[in-house]
Amino acid sequence: MANLGCPLKGGAGKRTGSPINIGGLLANLPLFQQLRESEIVNLAAAAREIGLSKGQILFQRGTLLDGFYVVVQGQVKLAFSSPQGHEKVVAIIEPGQSFGEAMMFLEKPCPVFAQALADTHLLYIAKRGIFAAIDHDSAFARRMLAGLSIRLRSLIHDVEDYSLHSSTQRVIGFLLHLAGTPDSGSATLELPTSKHVIASRLNLTPETLSRILHDLSESELIAVKGRHITVLDMARLRQFDDLLPPSHPLCDKSG
């Protein structure tokens, strides 16, 4: 069973103020938007609020999950450690996103650990409520499958990135994703977590990430101020890798 953190009654890592409307929150999540009101009520009755302080472990690798989690506020890191003690971040879960569904269905030990990257508020949804919703609504089952398929596609995309793209391409792709959809002009973004965690997520060393950000800044493609990054020209940044000759130092594929 996972460590369900601490009750939400104020203090570090916990919500303050009036309790949230769990049913209303669940009804607004994409996964649950098509459920009937009675089904939302049943899910809410089986849900549990969890508060985590920054750095607190939610569950360790090897935990058997009998439910899954939805991030309401904060961030959660999913990662594993190598025998040499190196950490690899698999995913950074943002508000409105869920995690743990696949291992809940598989009923196998979780291959990663989960840790709060900031003071975080979660909902824990027990599997008995999920299985009941699946039994009563085939559309809900399809959305669960779609969500798991998107997660699988993301993992395949990660393997492709690590195998085929240079370290600079990975960083540029990450920045473009954070900046959103503008095709031209400038855009300002904020790194969602520490550079150390981002480097691990991109399969880079922190030193490599810092070097690439510095080189992109020297090339007048971005401006960096702490966690705040301004993409000075979106179109030029998108084209940057295509313009690099193979001998350019930024073409290095190593992490």
Image (cartoon, helix red, strand yellow):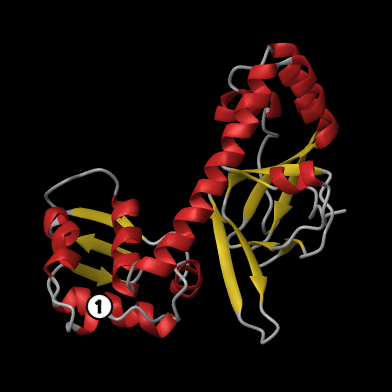
Horizontal side of residue 74 vs 106, given as left or right: left
- x, y percent for residue 130: 77, 29
Write the residue at 29% across / 81% down.
Answer: 252
- x, y percent for residue 43: 77, 26
Residue 177 in sight in this render: yes
Q: Nearer the viewer, residue 66 or 164?
A: 164
| Rendered position, 179 above or below 217 | above
- x, y percent for residue 141: 68, 25
- Quadrant that contains the C terminus: bottom left
Figure quadrant of residue 26: top right
Write the residue at 50% across / 54% down.
Answer: 156
Q: Nearer the viewer, residue 171 or 252?
A: 252
- x, y percent for residue 164: 36, 67
Number of other residues with Cα within 10 Å of mark 1, as a class: few under 14, some 14 to 19, many 20 or more:
some
Write the residue at 80% across / 48% down.
Answer: 7
On the image, numbered disc 1 is attached to which residue?
251
Q: Residue furthest right?
A: 1
